[in-house]
Image: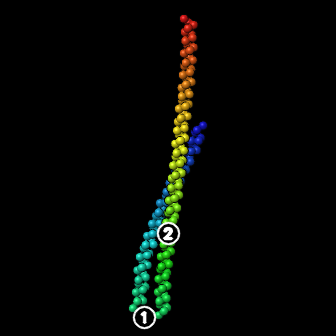
Amino acid sequence: MFDKIKRIKDVRLLNATLKEARLKLLHEHAVENEINALEIYHDFESERKVKEALIVQGVLGKVVQQSDLGLMNEKINILRNEEANLAIEHQDRKAEERQAYSQWLESVELRKHSQRKVDKLNVVCEMENEKHLMKVQYQEDMELEEFKTISNILDGINE
């Protein structure tokens, strides 16, 4: 009777364990992506500062036209926009990492819950088996007692 239930609970536990492992890998991948995005952002931030300084130095000390200043500002704005896009990309990766972590924690709790159910069912199965063994032992004892009683009666007749 409990065998079918036990198999179902074991399959559920296996599924929960596999889901936990899959989500753990997804979380680890999300952490790597977030770290990579942060490194790219910091690398570009340093690079942008150097490029910006070079652009400004190219104009300093020279007589330039208004269009040259506009071009300089445009180049600097392009660099800053790219840096801002990389910062947004990093924030997106960070949000994905947090979500993956949350999902992984939920799957851990689901697996623990499934494990507790399997453990409880195992206890019930053990109790049921013990109960069955005690019943079988009791029946055997009753048969032996009945046999002893019949044997005692026959012994009394033979005397």
Snapshot quadrant of residue 53: bottom left
Query: Percent position (x, y) of residue 68?
Result: 47, 90
Question: In the displayed structure, does residue 59 sit left or right of residue 124?
Answer: left
Assess disc 2: are there few (<14), some (14-19) or many (≥20) residues with their C-alpha within 10 Å of its C-alpha. Answer: some
**Residue furthest to the top:** 159
Q: Amino acid at mark 1?
A: Val
The structure residue drawn at horizontal position 47% and vertical position 66%, both measured from the top left corner, is 34
- Residue 91's disc is 2
* Camera-nearest residue between 105 and 12: 105
Q: Quadrant of the C terminus?
A: top right
Asked if residue 22 shows in the view, the reply is no
- Residue 123's disc is none
Q: Amino acid at mark 2?
A: Gln
Query: Percent position (x, y) of residue 21?
Result: 50, 54
Snapshot quadrant of residue 133: top right
The structure residue drawn at horizontal position 53% and vertical position 55%, both measured from the top left corner, is 106
Pointer 1 residue: 63
Against 5, residue 49 (above or below) is below
Query: Percent position (x, y) of residue 109?
Result: 52, 52
Q: How is the image coloured?
A: rainbow
Asked if residue 85 shows in the view, the reply is yes
Snapshot quadrant of residue 142: top right
Q: Secondary structure at mark 2?
A: helix
Q: Quadrant of the N terminus?
A: top right
The structure residue drawn at horizontal position 45% and vertical position 67%, both measured from the top left corner, is 36
Against 54, residue 140 (above or below) is above
Instruction: Name which of mark 2 and mark 1 comes first in the sequence.
Output: 1
